[in-house]
Structure formats: structure tokens, C-alpha cells
Image (spheres, rainbow, N blue to C red):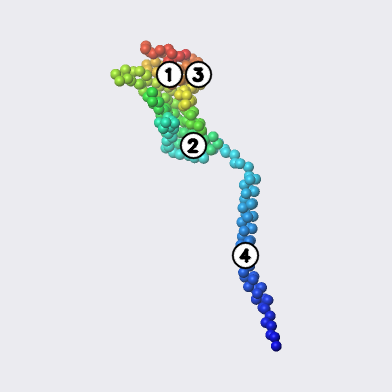
Amino acid sequence: MVIRVLPNIGGLLYEMGLKLIPLIIMGLLTLASFWFLEKNIVDEQAQPPRVKNHKPDYIFTNARLTVVNPDGTTKYRLLGKEFKHYEDDASIDIVQPRLRLFDPKNPPLTVTANNAHVTGDLDIIELFINADISRPAQLNSSGRVINPLLHLQSNYLKFFINDDKMKTHLPIRIQRGDSIMTASQGATYDNVNQATSMFGNVQGFIAPGDTSKNIAQ
């Protein structure tokens, strides 16, 4: 007599199902991850680039900005009660600025104003309201004045740092040594050549010893 034992089909299917469940779960997770990644990539590509607005992205209080020359020496140092950096053009607005410009050949210029605006490349500085520029006299070893005192006052001044020049279209008062001049329609000043051009109604006097090429009408 031959006795055959039939396999338990239900049990085999159950065991196979248990073994397949992890594979099925992993497959579903893989598909879900792929779908999620694909959806995000499509959404990011579909979005237009964000337009930067002229609004502050950083605000600093009682800050200091130091700009250096390629050789590491200080070009100028700018302090202020408040700095606002704008995201679109990287320009900076400053409340109560105090600027020091350093030139190895001349005494440093000290500049103050109520407000200032610095361009994004840091090479042009505009000063607004009560702009005041002063530079002490430069003396030689024997105490003789070789570069007289300089003092400029106006409600607007625009500095071109790289060119070492300044200009304004508003009334200005310039004192150089004992010479004092005023102009109703502004002036330009070239610190490299120590030359000044004044416009409009120009008044004042040139002290003995000062040359006309330094203060010109």
C-alpha cells in the first residue's frame, strides 16, 4: 500500500506571503520615494527665479566696515549707528556715518554726516545733510606746513573712492589753510592733484601764500 501525503497548500501560500511582504513594502517605499523626488524636481524647475527687491536683508547697529587695498592696507573705515544692507544691489544705507580715508602720502580725511549711501562695489559713498570733511595740516620734520588744513562743508557730497575725488551740486564752503571760499552751485575736489573747481556765485578770499591753482573759480 502506498500512502501519499499531500502538501498543505494553504500553509505554503501563507509562508510565501510572509516572505514576500517585506519585498512588497520595500518596493512601495521605493516607488513613493521616486515619485516624491520627481515631483519636487518638476516643481522647482517650474518656479520662476525670485526677483530681489530693494529692501534690507541685513540690519546692523553700531557697526564698522573696513575696506582694504590689494596689499592689505586699510583704504577706508566706515562706522555708523545703523547699517542697512539691500539684497538687490548690495548697497548700504548708514545712519550717522563716520568715515576715515587713509592715504599713505597725506593725513587721513575724516568725514561725518547725518546719513550715507554706499554702492554695492564699495567705491562710491554719498553723504547727506551736514556733510563735513576735515583733514589736518601736514607738517615736515622742521614743523613747516607742507599741506595745509582742509575743511569742506555741504549738505551733499559724493566721494569717488578709487579716483580720490569728490563733487557736489549744492552750496559748499571750503577752507584750505587760511583761505575760505563758498560756492552756490557746488564744486569738485581732486585730492590727488590738490585742485578745486567751484561753480555759481563764488565768494571768499585766498590768503597770501596760497596759489590760485588750488582754489579755482
Residue with the mark numbered 2: 84
How many other residues sit within 10 Å of disc 4, few (<14), some (14-19) or many (≥20)?
few
Choose mark 2 or mark 3, whichever is in front.
2
Residue with the mark numbered 3: 185
Tell whether label 3 touches label 2 (CB within 8 Å): no
Residue with the mark numbered 4: 23
Residue drawn at 39 percent across, 15 percent down: 179
Q: Amino acid at mark 3?
A: Gln
Q: Residue furthest left?
A: 142
Answer with mark 1 or mark 2, whichever residue precedes in sequence: 2
Q: Residue furthest right?
A: 1
Residue drawn at 33 percent across, 20 percent down: 139
Q: Amino acid at mark 1?
A: Gln
Answer with mark 2 or mark 4, whichever residue precedes in sequence: 4
- Alpha-carbon span between mark 2 and mark 4: 57 Å
Q: Amino acid at mark 4?
A: Leu
Q: Left or right? Give the position of 53 relative to 70.
A: right
- Alpha-carbon span between mark 4 and mark 1: 84 Å
Choose mark 3 or mark 4, whichever is in front.
4
So how many labels did they put on this image? 4
Instruction: Please tell me which residue lies in front, 32 or 98.
Output: 32
Tell whether label 4 touches label 3 (CB within 8 Å): no
